[in-house]
Amino acid sequence: MTLLEQTLAFMKPENWTQFHHARGIDNYPCDPTDPQAVRFCLDGALHKLCGKSKYSQGDSAYIYARDKLREISSILYPEVWSYSHANDLYGFDAVVKLLKEAIKNENSRHNLCSGLDSVHSKDNRFPR
């Protein structure tokens, strides 16, 4: 399961938030990796699932998911500059839409690349 798929499964209306990466039980902002964190914005959920502080650079799974969400966000919501702003301005339904579209895009590109691999493997002019 990819980080985008994990994030879609993780995000629920009751554990989602706006305007901060995460909020604790007391509803005050906190780091997504804080054990007291119970609500997360889209980017906070990515950090939570990667086990990385919002202040760290993240890892390759986070960077890939972030970049994919930026790409899809620029198509779905060109009037805002990032998926984080879509989270804050358009709400939970926009988060779900972004994740579903990013996963769909990810899967279609994977299938396209798999198809190209099978074409190249049959072509003896390009040995591997």
Image (tube, rainbow, N blue to C red):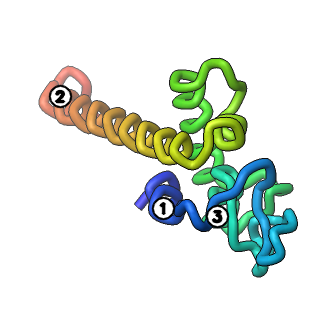
| Residue 85 coordinates in the image, percent (x, y) | 71, 36
Name the kind of residue labelled 1 in the image. Answer: Gln
Which label lies toward us, 2 or 1? 1
**Residue positioned 61% across, 33% down in the render:** 70
SS label for mark 2? helix
Residue 6's mark? 1
Q: CA distance from mark 3 to mark 1?
A: 10 Å
Q: Is residue 60 above or below residue 73?
A: below
Q: CA distance from mark 2 to mark 1?
A: 31 Å
Q: Indicate the amino acid at tag 2.
A: Val
Residue 41 falls in which quadrant of the image? bottom right
Measured along the vertical axis of the image, is residue 4 above or below residue 110?
A: below
Alpha-carbon neighbours of circle 3 within 10 Å: few (<14), some, or many (≥20)?
Answer: some
Query: Which residue is the site of mark 3?
Result: 50
Name the front one of labels 3 and 2: 3
User: From the viewer's perspective, is 98 left or right of 85?
Assistant: left
Residue at 49 percent across and 47 percent down: it is: 96
Q: Which residue is mark 2?
A: 119
Q: Front-most of 67 and 80? A: 80
If you read the primary sequence from the N terminus, does the residue marked by circle 3 or circle 1 appear first? 1
Task: Say which label, 3 or 2, has the lower sequence index.
Answer: 3
Q: Which mark is residue 102?
A: none
Residue 16 image offset from top left, x and y in percent: 63, 59
Residue at 85% of width from left, 55% of height from top?
55
Q: Is residue 124 left or right of residue 92?
A: left
Q: Which comes sooner in the sequence, label 2 or label 1?
A: 1
